[in-house]
Image: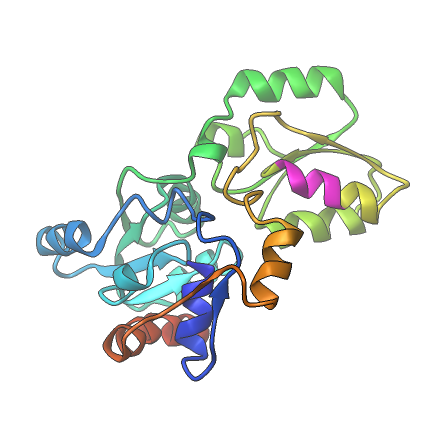
Amino acid sequence: FMAETCKILSPEKTVYLAQPTAGCKMAEQMDRQLISKVKQDYPNHTVVAYINTTADLKTICDVCVTSSSAVKIVNNIENKDILFIPDCNLGDYVAKQCPDKNIKLLNGGCPIHACVNTSDVEKAKELHPDAEILVHPECRPEIVAMADYVGSTSGIMEYAKKSDKKEFIIGTEISIAEHLQYECPDKKFYPLSLKLICSDMKATTLVDVLDCLNGTGGEEIVLDKDTISSAKKCIDEMIRLG
């Protein structure tokens, strides 16, 4: 979905996906056919799509959001009735931050974040009692409720860097704890769970990038003009409202 979004925003450029097998399980959960049927049941709802959706699905959505912009954008939508796809956990978090909105959720989301349970949080807190818990809103609502801070990947990193605290439990993909440890060697970072490993995020290697640059690997992202034009509307609306 990231490579497709690059192509949508820069259709005149050639965009490659260095490792063709690197996808997103959440983005693959819902397609245009499914959401078209759901829209028939909620004809007056504004369809808000997480950026983690395919270009084809974006063509029938009204506005895109990122995890960092979702609350602001949903608040700025005039319509009170919202159909939020595909992540029900992020949608639940947004709904609680936007109580004036009537937000319909579907059963979708990130399987990596969803695998974390309350016992994981309790165990991490027991091991590191002085650490603050920072989690991504793709986690389940009960995990979000136990956190000291909830935010996007960039939000988590910024919070940890600026905080006076010295220890943090990181509730998102395990590489974020690793990056933070590199950037803040004077602080300690612990993954909330060793289950927080996304194989898709780790699929692309430096060799894949090199092969792509040398023209011996990778896959070009090809989208037709109608798809680009239709999908760009919800991205433009994201920029306008966000």
Q: How many numbered circles are shown?
A: 0
Q: Check the image and report above or below for 232 versus 47.
A: below
Residue 108, image quadrant: top left
- Viewer-side residue, 237 vs 219: 219
Determine the main secondary structure of the stretch shown in magenta: helix
Q: Residue shown at 82%/45% (left/top)?
A: 182
**Magenta span:** 174-179
- Viewer-side residue, 115 vs 20: 20
Q: Residue shown at 38%/60% (left/top)?
A: 74
- Residue projecting furthest to the right: 186
Q: Check the image and report above or below for 205 versus 5.
A: above
Residue 45, image quadrant: bottom left
20 on left or right of 181: left
131 part of magenta stretch: no
Residue 241 visible in rendering: no
55 on left or right of 182: left
Where residue 137 appears, as percent x and y from the top left, is 50, 42
Residue 42 visible in rendering: yes
- Residue projecting furthest to the front: 216
Q: Residue shown at 31%/54% (left/top)?
A: 101
